[in-house]
Image: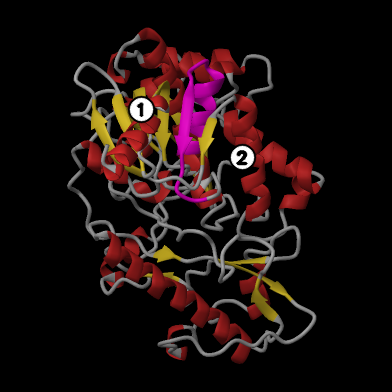
Amino acid sequence: MNKTILTGLLVLATALSCTRTYDVIVVGGGAGGTMAAIEASRDGALTLIVEEGPWLGGMLTSAGVSAIDGNYRLRGGLFGEFTDSLAARYGGYEALKSGWVSNILYNPAIGAEVLQNMAAEAGVHIRTRNQVTRIKKRWASGWTVTLGSGIRYHARVLIDGTELGDVAQEAGCEALQDRVSAQDLTYVAIVKEYDHDVLMEQPEGYDRELYRNCCVNWSPEMMLSYGHLPDGHWMLNWPESGNDYFAEYLDMGADERAEVIRKAKLRTLGYLYFLQHELGYTRLGIADDVFPTEDGLPLIPYWREARRIAGRDTMTVEAARRPYDFDLYTRAIAVGDYPVDHHHNQNPRREELSALACGSIPSFSVPMGVLIPVSVEDFLVADKAVSVSWEMNGATRLQPVVMEMGQAAGALAALAAKSRLSPSEIPAVLVQEVLLDHGCYLLPFLDLKPSDPGFRELQEAGIRGEVRGTGRSVGWANETWVNVPEN
């Protein structure tokens, strides 16, 4: 037999012998995708997660955004388990308050280790450093997923856990058409102070004018302490003449996006060069003990926006501000308490978009239907590509909300797989029961914590509309109470 044909047959036989059927496959180990895989596996679904890079966690770890935004008083479910693990690593929650941007800061490598352990202990089958090259809807139900190696897997339910919604696009999910402009992205850097000068060469295209106003409203010390990590490193993720970078990256091809990433890295290296050469931080350099990359920078950029699907529900700012004028709260599966925070400082249209910088809303709930596309069955979205309005994405894109939506996607996928139904056929109340079993918030009521007697009953009464919360903005933190405190 011809040697080439024989080799091809052997490769095919190997691929076919490795074909395996899963209840749930998550493509993309983003913050939401990782939570979806953990939850689905804990709920009894045979679950596989496939991630291109070496780490799970997406923006929590691989992008270096290791300062959690919001939900500090709403720690529940897998989000709460993650932060509890971080607190245990560092000696308590007070140790995590090392920088003023957040109450929870940590080294991204530690975060990646925690998530890897959580996924492994849950029984998730983990395939890092693997790329999915094709997905295909099966004629009856479910999906076939093909890796770059040629190995194929089948799944009852497929979940997009990518940062940008790439899988949802390939699956044919209809997109929301309300996007005005992509938010600025950031190539974060984790830096540390060395015991000697580590002055870098001037990066390509360096322009000091881009950075000279970075301390107009802050002292250099305040600017750096913004992202001071508990182990002494600093996270450089500074929006004011710092390392935010604008590009309309959502509709780009792979080569164009790679060029955006290259330029975003240069913007960050230019910022560090400015800190060294203009502000005198001559011993501050890229940390050599955090990321497994040649340049020491994170594995991926911090993408603040994804291609958002058109879902069975669409969450809007109006629904957040006036929840009882809508019925979305009855299908609540996640909560958030962060403002509508948009980054458009580098956008040529920044003056037009400036009103979105920090829009005021009360704390809010996200409905289950944002996870479910209107036109594709046996498919869910678990990261920033959920069905929310462009404006509302400024609040739902943040780490805790994405993690909670991911956990809900995992619970929904497991229920669908076990019942052999499509996710769109599963009533929200069944998912809500699973989430309450696992100590999750459905509504952002601050009256009771998950560990308090009566928490579940209050949450259940809330989604039935038997009790209502009053939302308000108090400084930077938003809140909702059934019984509003006098102070």
Badge count: 2
**Residue found at the very far front of the displayed protein:** 1
Image quarter in which the C terminus is found:
top right
Residue visible at 57% across and 80% down in the picture: 272
Residue visible at 23% across and 36% down in the picture: 171
Q: Give the CA distance from mark 2 to mark 1.
A: 31 Å
Residue 219, x across and y down, in percent: 63, 79
Residue 45 forms part of the magenta stretch:
yes
Provide the residue designation for mark 2.
115
Q: Earlier in the sequence, mark 2 or mark 1?
A: 1
Nearest to viewer (mark 2 / mark 1): 1
Residue 197, x across and y down, in percent: 72, 87
Q: Which mark is residue 16?
A: 1
483 with respect to 426 (left or right): right
Residue 458 forms part of the magenta stretch:
no
Residue visible at 50% across and 82% down in the picture: 270
The kind of secondary structure element at disc 2 is: helix
Q: Is residue 100 above or below residue 372?
A: below
- Magenta range is 33-53
